[in-house]
Image: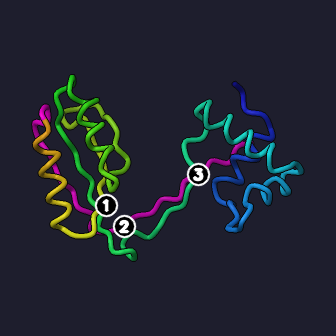
Amino acid sequence: MELTAFDKSLLNLLQSNLPICSHPFAEIASKLGTDESTVLDRIKTLKNEGFLRRIGTFFNSNALGYRGTLVALQVESNSIPKVAEVINNFPTATHNYEREGKFNLWFTLMTQDRAQEESILEEIRSIPGVDAMINLPSNKKYKINVQFQLQ
């Protein structure tokens, strides 16, 4: 599938201009000169085709009382899918991804306190196939606002 000019305009708006109202997609449709059902249909297609991963908001996790950490795991290659599945079942685990190198599975974890963090990490450390773990707690937040302006 190739992106149309409409798709590109829609994706540009979704990146930073999603209205906070009862019918945000109707408002976007108005900006694009179409109707809400067309916008919703295109969003569904773009998601199904892999151009759109999610629509959501970012919260200031620190202000909400959460602490974050980046965790690197050394996992036996045949165990990566199972370990990733277990991690994905923790509602506070995000950004779980495989990487090349000795530490080959990385994820972020948001918890309300150190005890919760330690409990979850201990459980993950005990999963068969996990050989090593590096816990890299967040000391300072850097927010990168990446937007892709599609022409």
Measuring from the top left, give residue 116's x and y in whole percent: 19, 63
The answer to whether 80 appears left or right of 65 in the picture is: left
Q: CA distance from mark 3 to mark 2?
A: 22 Å
Which residue appears at 44% of the width and 70% of the height?
60
Specify the amino acid type for callout 3.
Ile
* The residue stretch that appears in magenta: 128-151
Q: Is residue 48 above or below residue 95?
A: above
The answer to whether 147 appears left or right of 116 in the picture is: right
Q: Is residue 26 above or below residue 49?
A: below
In primary-sequence order, the first of circles 2 and 1 is 1
- Residue 141 is tagged as 2
Task: Characterize the local packing of mark 2: few (<14), some (14-19) or many (20 or more) Cα atoms within 10 angstroms.
Answer: few
- Classify the position of the C terminus by image quarter: top right
- Classify the position of the N terminus by image quarter: top right
Measuring from the top left, give residue 77's x and y in whole percent: 21, 25
Indicate whether residue 109 is drawn in magenta. Answer: no
In primary-sequence order, the first of circles 3 and 1 is 3
> Is there CB contact under 8 Å for labels 3 and 2?
no
Measuring from the top left, give residue 87's x and y in whole percent: 27, 44
Q: CA distance from mark 3 to mark 1?
A: 20 Å
Which residue appears at 70% of the width and 50% of the height?
12
- Check disc 1 and report its element: helix, strand or loop: strand
Q: CA distance from mark 2 to mark 1?
A: 13 Å
- Residue 89 is tagged as none
Task: Characterize the local packing of mark 3: few (<14), some (14-19) or many (20 or more) Cα atoms within 10 angstroms.
Answer: few
Magenta residues: mostly which secondary structure? Answer: loop
Image quadrant in which you'd find residue 57:
bottom right
Q: What residue did someone put label 3 on?
A: 55
Which residue appears at 47% of the width and 67% of the height?
59
Q: What residue did someone put label 1 on?
A: 110
Q: Residue furthest right?
A: 33
In primary-sequence order, the first of circles 3 and 2 is 3
